[in-house]
Amino acid sequence: MPNGEPRLVDIVVDHVLQTAAQLRHSAQRVVVVDHGSPLPAVTAVRDWLSAQLGERLGATMQVTQAVMERRAEAAYDFNGALLEEVLRGLAATDRATPVILAMLFIAAGRHAGAAGDIAAIIARVRADYPGFDVHPTPLVGSHPALVEILQARVNGQVIACNNLYISTKVYTYGKETSKNR
């Protein structure tokens, strides 16, 4: 598992709890959804974040995962199940318990927009399973703490670049010269 960004977990927990507070019934199920990727390292980040989310929310909430896109070949099974499959499975087993959809998207777009794929999937599943309710969280990009995370990452890269610059100084016959890289 990768060492993830704990502040990202804070954002997702905040969004899940915020969404849960708006429900009439107690939500006991959370589905973490992202775009999906053919790269195992990207999936490992979602796995890590979901595990952290499950620990923070405790045993009262079941945390599962889904993706919006994935390649069909068995070699990509690590990426997980598609959102529609996951929601249909949850609806088939228990329509009465609402699901919070933890949206791991920075901005609205083809998947996460108001008229995007996720809204269409939720509408289809609700039509097939009357009484089943899905409540998407706000997008990760809407949380003010994301700017702090990104700023810290940029600052870290600047420091890393400065360290790289310092480490490329070359000493030749007692004189300092710099290599441009």
Image: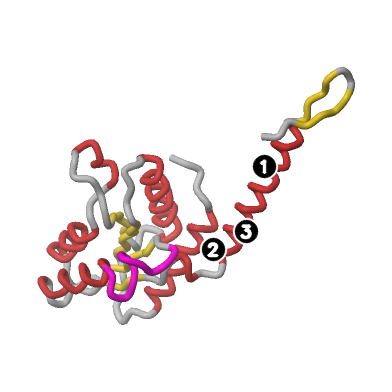
For the point 58% across and 58% down, which residue is it?
Answer: 149
Image quarter (top left, top right, bottom left or bottom right) of the C terminus: top right
Residue displayed at 31% across by 61% down: 31
Q: Would you name the residue on which mark 3 appears?
A: 151
**Can you give x and y, in whole percent of width and height, for residue 100 in the image?**
32, 68
User: What whole-number distance in Å separates the C-alpha atoms at marks 2 and 3?
Assistant: 8 Å
Give percent across and percent down for residue 120.
Answer: 21, 71
Q: Quadrant of residue 67?
A: bottom left
Q: Secondary structure at mark 3?
A: helix
Q: Which residues are magenta?
A: 106-116
Q: Is residue 179 above or below residue 110?
A: above
Residue type pointed to by label 3: Gln
Total number of numbered discs in the rendering? 3
Q: Which residue is mark 1?
A: 160
Decide whether residue 89 is among the magenta residues.
no
Question: In the figure, is residue 14 to the left or right of 127?
Answer: right
Q: Which residue is mark 2?
A: 146
Q: Position of residue 128 (x, y in %)?
A: 10, 71
Of callouts 1 and 2, which one flags the residue occurring earlier in the amino acid sequence?
2
Mark 1 secondary-structure assignment = helix
Query: Could you give the CA–CA distance between mark 1 and mark 2, rounded to whole angstroms?
Result: 21 Å
Q: Earlier in the sequence, mark 3 or mark 1?
A: 3
Q: Residue furthest right?
A: 174
**As shown in the figure, which amino acid type bears the numbered disc 1?**
Ala
Q: Is residue 108 magenta?
A: yes
